[in-house]
Image: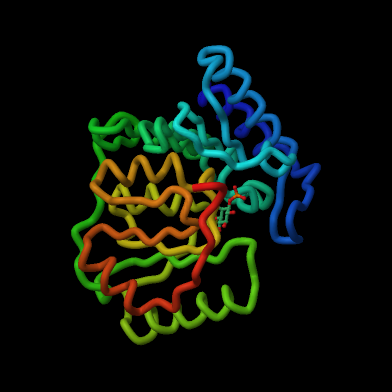
Amino acid sequence: MVDRAGTLVRDAFEQPTSNVETKSSNTDLVTETDKAVEELLIRGLSKEFPDHKFIGEESVSGGQKVELTDAPTWIIDPIDGTTNFVHRIPLIGICVGLAIKKQLRAGIVYNPITRELFSAQKGKGAFKNGFPIHVSKTEACSNAVVVTQIGSIRTPEMMNSFVQSFNSVIGDKQAHAHRAFGSAAINMVYVAQGSIDAYVEYGLHCWDIAAAAMILKEAGKPFNLMGRTVLCAGTPSLAKELSSALTHVEMETEGDA
Ligand code: IPD
């Protein structure tokens, strides 16, 4: 099913961009393809699992409540990195996560352009195209490639956090490099495969992170799915050092969780 969704996204990626709409603000984009992919995934999964529930980015934009209950729930972001998709930057992820009793059980992040399929199931490890992946062993910020990303929320508090944290981590601590790939899921699976050492972002939603969080969790990282913040790193010492260097933003928990 994710395969079929991938074909849909790849076909659209090869055509000129059309039908871009904005949602909560001018920096929050959606396309016909986002909606079509979410529909395809929900239709397919409902057929196989009629009792299961769904949290989908575009369904929530259409007015559905974010409700994570004990029921098996598929958490879907049809295209994580919609802005990349709109600008034809090939860093996007079709994200499908499964939570049961509010605990993540499985996750898939598929980049249909690069044909990289990241997957994990609880207790079975994390994989890219079938091969095991692992986080990096980097301990110190001064040896790390760090992703700090700002999403569509551009409040003064967010901007201040981003700029202060950038100065502190990249300037004061002299991290090896700064990157930002424009997709929370891609940022996270890159931590999972050890290409980058750490990633921080505030203001995310559960659909941006659920599938990739499962992949990271399989590397032993605890995760608050509804917390709207990601701070992940290959090692606990890097996470600790980074956390003390960041200007944090307090986020309210999503939904009723
Ligand atoms: C966005 C991406 C982006 C992040 C934003 C998210 P979307 O998700 O993950 O990297 O910075 O905060 O909203 O809208 O492309 O699914």
Q: Position of residue 178 (x, y in %)?
A: 41, 70
Q: Residue 45, position in %: x, y? A: 54, 19
Residue 70 is left or right of residue 61, and the answer is left
Q: Residue at x 38, y 37 (%)?
A: 104
Q: Position of residue 251 (x, y in %)?
A: 52, 64
Residue 210 placement, left or right of 4: left
Looking at the rendered structure, the number of numbered marks drawn on it comes to 0
Task: Tell me which corner region of the image, top left, top right, bottom left or bottom right, holds residue 182.
Answer: bottom right
Q: Nearer the viewer, residue 232 or 117?
A: 232
Q: Nearer the viewer, residue 53 or 152?
A: 53
Q: Within the image, what quadrant is residue 99 found in?
A: top left
- Above or below residue 36? Residue 175 is below
Q: Residue at x 80, y 42 (%)?
A: 19
Instruction: Estimate the x, y position of residue 230 in percent, counting from the top left.
Output: 42, 58
Horizontally, is 128 left or right of 124 in the view? Answer: right
Residue at (34% x, 41% y) in the render: 215
Residue nearest the viewer, comparing 138 with 47: 47
Of 68 and 144, the residue lying toward us? 68
Above or below, 170 relative to 254:
below
Farthest bottom residue? 172
How was this image coloured?
rainbow
Q: Residue at x 41, y 43 (%)?
A: 212
